[in-house]
Structure formats: C-alpha cells, structure tokens
C-alpha cells in the first residue's frame, strides 16, 4: 500500500489490541497536519479483517484496520495529496462564485479554508520531498 496521508481534521483513534483481555487498548489523539504513513506491513485478524502498520511520523506506530482508513478518508479526516488538490480546486471555484455574486461572507469563509488547505499541501509536499521519506 505505502500511502502517505495528512490529517485534515484532528481526531481520536482507538488502537485495538488482540491480546487476551485487550490490555494494550488505548486511544491515540491524532492532530491536524500530522502525517500518517501507511506501510505494506499488514496482518489479517480472523473476524476483524486486514490491519496495516501505520506510522504517525515522529510520534507513534500502530496497526489500523483497512475499514478505519477508508472511514477517516471518506470523512476528510485524513487526506491523500489527490484529495488536497481536489479540495483546492473546489475552494477556488467557490471563491470565484462568491466574487461573481459579491458574497463577502462566503468569500471570507472559503478564503480561510483555502489558506488552511494550502498549508496542508505545503507541509505534505515538504515531507514528500524530504530525505526523511522512508517505508518501514
């Protein structure tokens, strides 16, 4: 898989433990602009499905269910570079619409969102270009 995501919205993720008694279960807080690298290392847990090793860069390693990755991506909590590009296109369109309609409130709203998404893009680009890019 080897995919790099950036966190668009902060969220908490419950790390699952498959030990008897689930003694290692904990909640991991993942903050906006954290970078998550999902590696090719994976496990299949009978009854639960596929789990991929994920690394919150410079912070934490854990296994995450494929189902959870898809859920967080669908909600916009984690973004691929392609998602960021689509969001930038959408926000630029909305800003153009607000300008055409002389709608100052929407112009301000979408401009602020555009700045936020642009900051995520810059951080992701720097990460992808850095020498720190590795796959565990």
Image (spheres, rainbow, N blue to C red):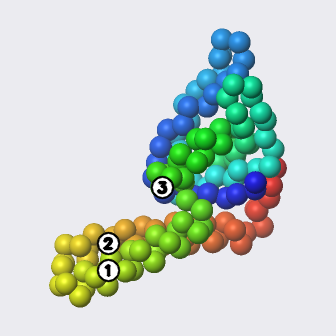
Q: Neighbour class for label 1 at 10 Å: few (<14), some, many (≥20)?
A: many
> Mark 3 highlights which residue?
76
| Quadrant including the N terminus | bottom right
Q: Is residue 41 above or below residue 88?
A: above
Disc number at residue 110?
A: 2
Q: Tags 2 and 1 in contact by the CB under 8 Å rule?
A: yes
The residue located at (52%, 68%) in the rendering is: 84
What secondary structure is marked by label 2? helix
Q: Nearer the viewer, residue 136 or 79?
A: 79
Mark 2 Cα-neighbour bin, 10 Å: few <14, some 14–19, many ≥20 = some
Residue 45 vs residue 88, the one in the foreground = 45
| Labels 2 and 1: the sequence-earlier one | 1
Residue 107 drawn at (x, y percent): 26, 77
Give residue 89's position: percent from left, percent from top.
45, 77
Check residue 95 in the rendering and tell me which mark sits there, or answer none: 1
Q: Whole-Å distance between the Cαs marked 1 and 3?
A: 20 Å
């Amino acid at each position: 898989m080897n995919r790099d995501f950036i966190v668009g919205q902060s969220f908490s993720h419950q790390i699952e433990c498959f030990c008897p008694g689930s003694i290692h279960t904990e909640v991991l807080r993942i903050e906006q602009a954290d970078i998550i690298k999902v590696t090719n290392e994976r496990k299949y847990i009978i009854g639960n499905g596929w789990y991929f090793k994920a690394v919150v860069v410079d912070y934490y390693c854990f296994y995450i269910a494929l189902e959870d990755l898809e859920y967080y991506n669908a909600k916009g909590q984690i973004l691929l570079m392609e998602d960021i590009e689509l969001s930038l296109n959408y926000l630029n369109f909305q800003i153009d619409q607000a300008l055409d309609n002389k709608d100052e409130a929407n112009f301000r709203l979408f401009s602020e969102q555009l700045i936020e998404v642009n900051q995520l893009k810059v951080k992701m680009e720097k990460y992808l270009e850095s020498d720190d890019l590795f796959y565990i």
